[in-house]
Amino acid sequence: MTRIWLCADDYGIAPGVNAAIRDLVARGRLNATSVMVVAPTFSRAEAVGLSILNGVTHRAAIGLHVTLTGPLKPLTGGFAPLKEGAFLPVSQMLLRALARCLDKEALVREVEAQFTAFAAAFGRPPDFVDGHQHVHLFPIVRDAVLDAMRQFAPEAWVRQCGASQPLKLSDPKGALIDWLSGAFKKRAAARGIAANPLFAGTYTYRADADFQTLFPGFLKGLTEGSLVMCHPGTVDAELARLDPLTTLREREYAYFRGDRFPQDLAAQGLSLNG
């Protein structure tokens, strides 16, 4: 069997997401999750609740989900630019990054603060690092993240988002992050930082998206150590306040809990990494 990572993003964003991720880890249906330490409801208790699942058997890698887009707020003072006290929306952040118009010193301070907050909550560095809305791939941001990894998490690996199969015109987000990953992988390799070989899991988050039909397509062509991104959860008021991705999380959660998911994995000769 070819072993892959199935990583649930956004642990920490809201209680309903956290509980769903812990449930799937306990069931052996996830083997990685990345933590959003800037989320208002994230706490030491939420970190402990996740960590204890690795108490007897190591069930899941726990990573840092570097967050630099709104409506979340920075941990550090002086971060700029902001919009109403929060990070910029992802589209504005990307445009500023591409134009090299970000405050590098403020960015480095914020990224380092998130690494420090993770270590304070979990008592150790992250196993891996990725970014909310893939912000870690952006110009300027990528160097801040990779340099912080060398300092604060030298044994960690990083998520790159190079596609596992030819991209479709219907998946512009996948095409964008695949393109950004080219330069990102070179920078990671130059620093001696390991990365997953292939990536899958992007789709257009339309209300009518049929996740259980889409997911088997993500599994095609994956090699050992490849990573599939997902966003399971249940909807609560905090999630609705912070993120537009709501009810689709419940569809993902239902699929991963059900019988079809392990059958789809086995049909492709895949298993989850230990």
Image (cartoon, rainbow, N blue to C red):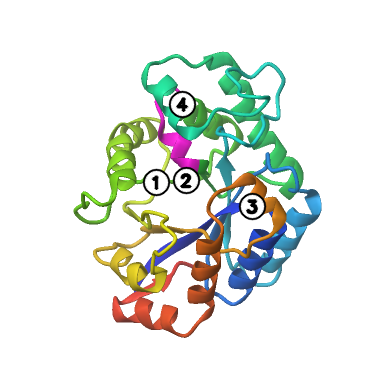
Asked whether the residues under the numbered discs 1 and 2 touch, taking CB atoms below 8 Å apart as contact, a structural biologist would say yes
Residue 92 circle label: 4
Which element type, helix, strand or loop, lies under badge 4?
helix
Q: Which residue is mark 3?
A: 240
Q: Which residue is mark 2?
A: 157
Pointer 4 or 3: first along the chain: 4
Residues under labels 4 and 1: Cα distance?
Answer: 27 Å
Which element type, helix, strand or loop, lies under badge 2?
strand
Name the residue rendered at 53%, 75% in the picture: 254
Majority secondary structure in the magenta region: helix
* Three-letter code for the amino acid on which mark 1 is drawn: Ala
Pointer 3 or 1: first along the chain: 1
Which element type, helix, strand or loop, lies under badge 1?
loop
* Three-letter code for the amino acid on which mark 4 is drawn: Gln
Residues under labels 2 and 4: Cα distance?
Answer: 28 Å
Residues under labels 3 and 2: Cα distance?
Answer: 31 Å
Q: Is residue 268 left or right of residue 45?
A: left
Pointer 4 or 1: first along the chain: 4
Residue 139 covered by magenta stretch: yes
Pointer 2 or 4: first along the chain: 4
In this view, 1 is above or below 53: below
* Three-letter code for the amino acid on which mark 3 is drawn: Ala
Residues under labels 1 and 2: Cα distance?
Answer: 5 Å
In this view, 2 is above or below 141: below
Q: Mark 3 or mark 1: which is in front?
A: 3
Residue 105 appears at what percent x and percent y? 57, 14
Q: Mark 3 or mark 2: which is in front?
A: 3
Q: Which residue is mark 1?
A: 195
In this view, 84 is above or below 246: above
Pointer 1 or 2: first along the chain: 2
* Three-letter code for the amino acid on which mark 2 is drawn: Trp
